[in-house]
Amino acid sequence: MTLMMSVTSKCFAGGIGCGIAGFLTNPADVIKVRNQQFTDAKYHSFRTTSTTIFKEEGIRGFYKGAAASVLRECTYSSLRMGLYEPIKSQYAMFFHDDGNSPIVKWFSAFTSGAIGSAIFNPIDVVKVRFQSQLPNAPPPYSSLFNAFHTIYTEMGLQGLYIGTSATVTRAAFLTSAQLGSYDVIKNNIFVKMFGFDKEANTTHFSASIIASVITTTAANPADVVKTRVMNDPNATIGGPSKHLMHIWKMNGVSGFMKGWTASYLRIGPHTVISLVLIEKVRQIIGMSSY
């Protein structure tokens, strides 16, 4: 298999696994976005936010932005998952490592997440805008195409890449904590130290469960900042650094963990479903697991 075919296959497996996971966990993503964006009492916690959405918008409210979410997973996540191993190989050569160092794995995942996010930031902007729509407000855009066209017409490329620094930071930390930690937990600990079967579903599932908790905690601060920036197109508060200081001033450390439960109920299942499915798809198309 050529290098191009190998990378394409890895991206394909990543896109399939993350696309399915993204659709299934969209309700928790909507709750998380509302929870992080609005300070009203009815959006104060995971329970109150989910109850409010169900009462005011019904089941359909939980699937706002689902199309953009799936598109994002099939592009951004496809790239971050597919580029991880090629990048890891390059870092291993540069650092004269065999590729098993946790530092190399975390740094490789950090890089692949940043690259995928930087390229596909416009899809993330559209997703957040759709998910932030309140029940009595008109839809922000009539369709995905209309969303991209409207934002580009009104603000140019700058509008599509608003919040890129916050998005890239979140994606880098998330992928490092998710895929990098999964690789470390699975291969460095479970397989090497305890003799687990590398290709077993139970190994994949157990490693992904632990990685999901690490992922949510590492990504939540940047996720809160990203949500605030993307819903502030006129820069009323300012850029990511201004939003970061505003959150710190208003809420302290707890402000950066706002929406953690909703984030975990999205990132946790997403991490487990996507990684287990990616491993299965890789096996089906004749590739070894991570």
Image (tube, rainbow, N blue to C red):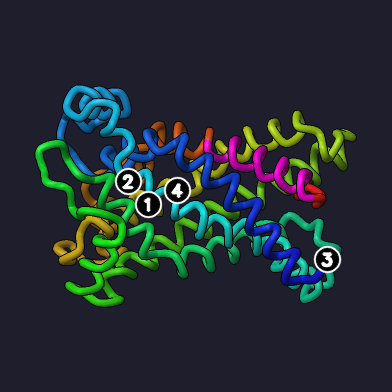
CA distance for labels 1 and 4: 6 Å
**Judging from the image, what secondary structure is the residue with disc 2 in?**
loop
Q: Which residues are magenta?
A: 270-285
Mark before the other along the chain sequence, 2 or 4: 2
Can you give x and y, in whole percent of width and height, for residue 197 in the image? 86, 35
Q: Dots 1 and 2: beta carbons under 8 Å?
A: yes
CA distance for labels 3 and 2: 37 Å
Can you give x and y, in whole percent of width and height, for residue 81 in the image? 62, 56
| In the displayed structure image, the side of residue 143 where residue 94 appears, left or right | right
Above-or-below relation of 68 to 164 = above
Q: Amino acid at mark 3?
A: Met
Q: Which mark is residue 65?
A: 2
**Judging from the image, what secondary structure is the residue with disc 3 in?**
loop
Q: Residue at x 20, y 59 (%)?
A: 232
Image quadrant of residue 205? top right
Q: Which residue is mark 4?
A: 70
CA distance for labels 1 and 3: 33 Å
Q: Amino acid at mark 1?
A: Ala
CA distance for labels 2 and 4: 9 Å
Mark before the other along the chain sequence, 3 or 2: 3
Q: Which mark is residue 48?
A: none
As for residue 175 lying within the magenta part, the answer is: no
Q: Amino acid at mark 4?
A: Val
Above-or-below relation of 10 to 256 = below
Q: Which residue is mark 1?
A: 68
Q: Amino acid at mark 2?
A: Gly
**Judging from the image, what secondary structure is the residue with disc 1 in?**
helix
Q: Which residue is mark 3?
A: 1
Work out whether residue 161 or residue 15 is closer to the camera in this orientation and state it.
Answer: 15
